[in-house]
Image (cartoon, rainbow, N blue to C red):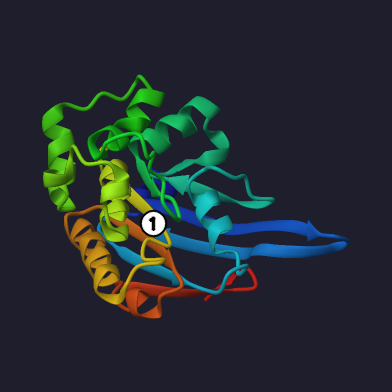
Amino acid sequence: MTGEQDRFAKGVLLEARGIKKSYKRGDNPFCAADNISLSINPGEFIGITGRSGSGKSTLMNILAGLMTPDEGEVFFEGKSYKKMTDRELSALRCNGLGYIMQGLSVLPNFTVYENILIPEWLDRRRKSSPKDILKAMKKVGIAHLKRQYPSRLSGGELRRVSIARALLSSPKLLIADEPTSDLDEETAENIVNILSDIAREGVAVLMVTHDREAAAKCGREYQMKNGVLT
């Protein structure tokens, strides 16, 4: 076993090394990710805070394999994204990674149960049993809402639908982009507690948030400013 393989064998789940990503705003370049390095182990609950435009979402998209950095490399369980085919990256996002997008990601004409199943309808390689679906719903406390439509749900309940959907593939890493946005203090605390419970069960959780109180409950907290992670 090489030193590189041994490092991941000892528990590093995801590692980003020297990530850089720049954009142009008119004639001016903007560095959204400036030489970022980060490692995540199974069961860790990590929070990243920062203002809008600080580069948080860019970093999340790179870590999820949705965006390619200008420089640097991301590894998942020792394998570089650069060496993965599009099919392999897609499979990773379907099985290894769970992604909770910012805002509401439900379809109004579908029930809670149907909304959770949307990724499986889009990717026929995924097939969950009714027992698996019910387990994910119970974990976030919405099993009793399975036949309800989004218009009948609160903001916190809708966010739980997104979490249950992400959990259905039994991910090793759950990435949550602003999971407490637009929620009242008590509801936001409940959502963070759910994510914390998920981490305690062994799933790594990476949460991006404006909410400093939410981030303070993470095991590790970082701040992003002008593309720099500190």
| Quarter of the picture holding the N terminus | top left
Q: Note whether 230 is above or below 5 in the view shown.
A: below
From this viewpoint, is residue 172 visible? Answer: no
Nearest the eye: 82 or 137: 137
Residue 224 placed where, x, y %?
Answer: 54, 72
Residue, disc 1: 176
Nearest the eye: 21 or 3: 21
From this viewpoint, is residue 32 visible? Answer: yes
Furthest residue toward front: 152
Q: Could you tell me which residue is drawn at 55 percent across and 34 percent down? A: 83
Residue 119 placed where, x, y %?
Answer: 37, 32
Nearest the eye: 145 or 83: 145
The crowding category of the residue bearing disc 1, from other C-alpha atoms within 10 Å (few below 14, some 14 to 19, many at least 20), is many
Q: Is residue 80 left or right of residue 202?
A: right
Q: Could you tell me which residue is drawn at 36 percent across and 50 percent down? A: 8
Q: Quadrant of residue 208?
A: bottom left
Amino acid under label 1? Answer: Ala
Q: Quadrant of residue 97?
A: top left
Furthest residue toward right: 27
Q: Could you tell me which residue is drawn at 53 percent across and 50 percent down? A: 61
Kind of element beneath mark 1: strand
Residue 87 placed where, x, y %?
Answer: 49, 25
